[in-house]
Image (cartoon, helix red, strand yellow):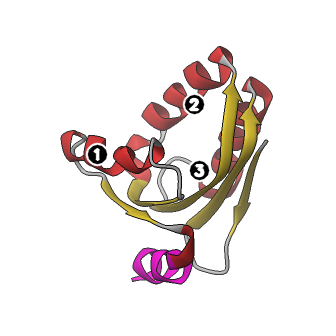
Amino acid sequence: MLKITESDYPNVIYMEVDGGVTKKDTDEAAEFISRHYGESSEINVLAYFKKIQNVEVGALVKGTFVDMWYWNQYEKIAFVTDDERLKKADSVADYLPGLNVKEYDKAEMDDAWSWLSE
């Protein structure tokens, strides 16, 4: 399940993954971003991965297109997880221009919020 909501901080989206992610989840995420931020607002994201499994192929494709569509709006993304496989995401971001990504352990959630709100 993918949950996406506004946070208490301006232009910071909270995304939580707990289990599988479906194409319906990513469709709803795209709609949420479009409805709340349009095509011009700067967006920061706290992506909290509680548990990830069973990600549908359609969700991966849709997620990629959502990311490309809103690419110029992303400023910072904080990955919060204790999953070692996902911790490599911030090293991939070194090759993605204009995107500032940091990884945090679950115990560092407050640090992630602080960084995003700077």
Q: Nearer the viewer, residue 95 or 36?
A: 95
Residue under label 1? 93
The secondary element bearing badge 1 is classed as helix
- Front of the two marks 2 and 1: 1
Q: Quadrant of the N terminus?
A: top right
Residue under label 3? 38
Q: Quadrant of the C terminus?
A: bottom left
Where residue 93 appears, as percent x and y from the top left, is 28, 45
In the image, residue 54 sits, relative to residue 103, either above or below, namely above
Q: Residue at x 66, y 24 (%)?
A: 59
N-terminal-most mark, 3 or 1: 3
Where residue 45 appears, as percent x and y from the top left, is 52, 60
Q: Residue at x 68, y 33 (%)?
A: 53
Q: Amino acid at mark 3?
A: Gly
Q: Nearer the viewer, residue 115 or 85?
A: 85
Disc 3 and disc 1: Cα gap in Å?
24 Å
Where residue 78 appears, as percent x and y from the top left, is 45, 62
The reply, left or right, for residue 17 in relation to residue 84 is right
Picture quadrant where residue 95 is located: top left
Disc 3 and disc 2: Cα gap in Å?
17 Å
- Front of the two marks 3 and 1: 1
In the image, residue 74 sits, relative to residue 60, either above or below, namely below
Residue under label 2? 63
* Image: magenta residue range: 108-118
In the image, residue 5 sits, relative to residue 22, either above or below, namely below
Q: Residue at x 76, y 39 (%)?
A: 28
